[in-house]
Amino acid sequence: MNESQIGESFRKTENASKLSRNSEFLSLWFVGGILNILRWLELLAVGIVVFDMTASPFYVALMVTLRFLPMLFLGFLSGAIVERINRRLGLIIILFLMAFASFFYGLEIYFGQISFWLICTSVIFNGILWALDNPLRRTLFADVVKPEQIGTAMTLDSLTSNFTRFLGPFLGGLFLEYYGIEGVFFLGAIIYLLSFLVTIFGTKTAGIKLASNQEGILTELTNGLILLRKDRTLKGILAVTIVFNLLGFPFVSLIPVIGKEVLELSPFLIGLLVSTEGLGAIISSLVIVSITRINLYRKFYTYGVFLFLLMGFSFAQSSDFVSAVICMFFTGVGWGCFSAMQATLIMFCTPLVARGRMMGLLTASIGLNTVGILHIGLLANWLGTELAILVSTAEGFLLLIFVCRLWPEIIAPQLLPSD
């Protein structure tokens, strides 16, 4: 390790140490962690329940589509809106509403009112909070940490998110097997209420308005698009996100189908299989936090997607539990590299006053996975689940090569933010 690498490692360790003493950062970090546990727990549980109800891979994929639909329609607009409000207060209100809604869904199912349409409604409503996470909670990090700490803060948040992809599906399979889908919703109510209380008492100064309100929302949205049009790096970053969400991530929606139809696993073992992907993501995020230099951020981001697509292609050809677990682990390694860098690069490459809008655009780009999930769901109905995954991931691999040639900036060295 040369002198510059030692210095970079020391700065990362020093930043992490300072963040551990920042109570507002810790509160936001904790809230993000427990919310992500719930998201992946619910996603797995709903997929298994809907497949039991309908025996249709398409409807399983549809549930994931509905979960991400709010991102597509609310993403960019919400990014401009949250610049004009107190984001802390907005987060508190959303968390309270989610706690009430989850308790209501749990009661309905407990008293025998479960239906396909009730599940659909719950998925959409929970997707609204996910759509607001980037422009609300994650932009609050920039309010409570110094510019040079943003990369470490976002990577630690991504590390936690990756850990929840390990823990969430495991708990989802466990809760579903022993407590039913109503138990999942009652747990959700508890987690949302806890997040509500932590945000109220753990954050005090975060959430100031970013916009001056002198311009209309439409003008601000237009200015955000103008900034994107002029900045090749931002265009490349969003293009990689679109490839991942359009043709990579959608295969995850069909894992419960592969688990039940091909591998003949119980809900608990399906949860264990999905959690293996989270374990791989944890390990890659830990590596990034501990030793990765900032100038390598874009390479980890882009090459992580290449690895994810390659391992997704391999997973579709797995014939036993062990080979499926190995593929899922390395899928997680790729996803961990990508997810650790996604919001970090947007924060690094965007001026402070426009971060809400760019995070909103990022959210809308993530929401395009609704199209990808419908695409892979229809392919699964026409060609079978395994062949659908092969086709989707192969398309993603080819499109990512094209994106790298069109915007080579996405694998260029990354610099520290100027503000």
Image (cartoon, helix red, strand yellow):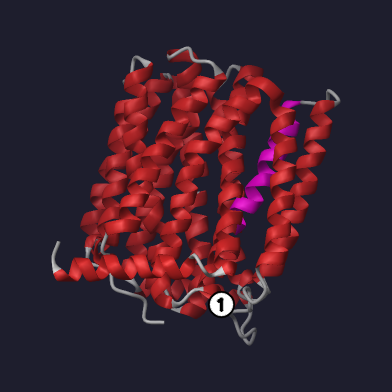
Instruction: Give the x, y percent position of residue 61.
Output: 54, 31
Task: Mark 1: give few (<14), some (14-19) or many (20+) Cα within 10 Å.
Answer: many
Residue farthest to the left, as pictured:
2
The kind of secondary structure the magenta stretch mainly shows is helix
Residue 117 magenta: yes
Q: Which residue is rendered at x = 64% and y = 77% of the image?
A: 205
Query: Image check: 380 left or right of 329?
Result: right
Query: Image check: 407 left or right of 44?
Result: left
Q: Which residue is mark 1?
A: 220
Instruction: Give the x, y percent position of residue 75.
Output: 57, 59
Query: What's under tag 1, amino acid-wise?
Result: Glu
Looking at this view, is 307 or 32 the one in front?
Answer: 32
Residue 414: which quarter of the image? Answer: bottom left
- Highlighted range, magenta: 115-132
Q: Is residue 327 visible?
A: yes
Above-or-below relation of 179 to 398: above
Instruction: Give the x, y percent position of residue 280.
Output: 36, 39
Q: Which residue is rendered at x = 56% and y = 62% of the image?
A: 26
Looking at this view, is 258 or 376 the one in front?
Answer: 258
Q: Is residue 390 visible?
A: no
Q: Which residue is rendered at x = 28% and y = 41% of the image?
A: 307
Find numbered disc 1 in the image and state the secondary structure of the residue it sits on: helix
